[in-house]
Image (cartoon, rainbow, N blue to C red):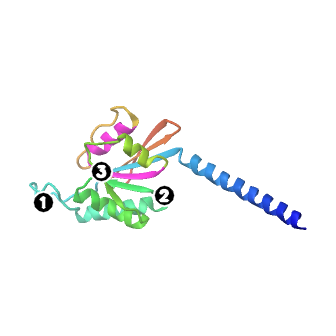
């Protein structure tokens, strides 16, 4: 009886370990795709041209809330924003909904090796500016393909997916 019970225990452990290995394999498989969602900040207050760090307007706050609604059913693992009021405020609503902390990045240091490692296998929201957002997309894909966003355009979404080294870009207009 003791040998039979020991045999059952060993089989149970092997089955559990095999199941655990399959789960580990799935995690590795899931980390083979990285998706970046890149947006420009929402509408900013332009009433004081000398203000280099304005807040969002009411329209901008509404757009930032709409971004949170857009991402409601999309898994977001990390959120990055430049360190400006308008970008942080744009990211804040999605960050609150997703319970993800907004991390700051410097627009002069786009898509370096540390960032690639940090974000590998994740779904990442990046909030930038009319120039830094397409520059970031260009840095990810390794070519100068996308020009600055028009100053009155705040609803573009660049979705960059990297799977097994293949990079795909989709541009959506979200109003």
Across and down, in percent, residue 161 comes to: 47, 43
Instruction: Name the element at disc 2.
Output: loop
Q: Residues within 10 Å of mark 1 (few under 14, many from 20)?
A: few
Mark 1, residue position: 47
Q: How many marks?
A: 3
**SS assignment at label 3:** loop
Above or below, 131 relative to 123:
above
Which residue position holds label 3?
A: 105
Q: From the image, which quarter does the C terminus lie in?
A: bottom left
> In the rendered structure, which disc, 1 or 3, sits on the residue that comes first in sequence?
1
The residue stretch that appears in magenta: 122-140
Residue neighbourhood size for the residue with mark 2, other residues' Cα within 10 Å, grouped as few (<14), some (14–19), many (≥20): few
Instruction: Check disc 2 and report the residue beneath it.
Output: 75
Q: Viewer-nearest of labels 1 and 3? A: 3
Tell me the CA gap for discs 1 and 3. 27 Å
Residue 19 - label: none
The Cα atoms of the two marked residues, 2 and 1, are separated by 36 Å
Residue drawn at (33%, 37%), measured in percent from left and top?
A: 146
């Amino acid at each position: 009886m003791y040998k039979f019970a020991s045999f059952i225990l060993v089989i149970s452990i092997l089955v559990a370990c095999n199941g655990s290995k399959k789960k580990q394999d799935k995690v590795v498989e899931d980390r083979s795709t990285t998706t970046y969602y890149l947006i420009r900040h929402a509408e900013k207050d332009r009433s004081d041209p000398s203000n280099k760090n304005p807040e969002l307007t009411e329209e901008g706050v509404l757009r930032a809330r709409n971004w949170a609604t857009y991402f409601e059913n999309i898994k977001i693992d990390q959120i990055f924003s430049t360190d400006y009021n308008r970008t942080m405020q744009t990211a804040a609503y999605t960050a609150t909904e997703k319970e993800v902390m907004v991390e700051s990045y410097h627009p002069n240091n786009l898509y370096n090796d540390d960032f690639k490692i940090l974000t590998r296998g994740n779904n990442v929201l990046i909030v930038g500016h009319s120039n830094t957002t397409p520059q970031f997309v260009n840095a990810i894909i390794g070519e100068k393909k996308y020009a600055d966003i028009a100053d009155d355009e705040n609803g573009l979404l660049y979705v960059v997916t990297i799977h097994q080294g293949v990079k795909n870009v989709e541009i959506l207009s979200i109003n």
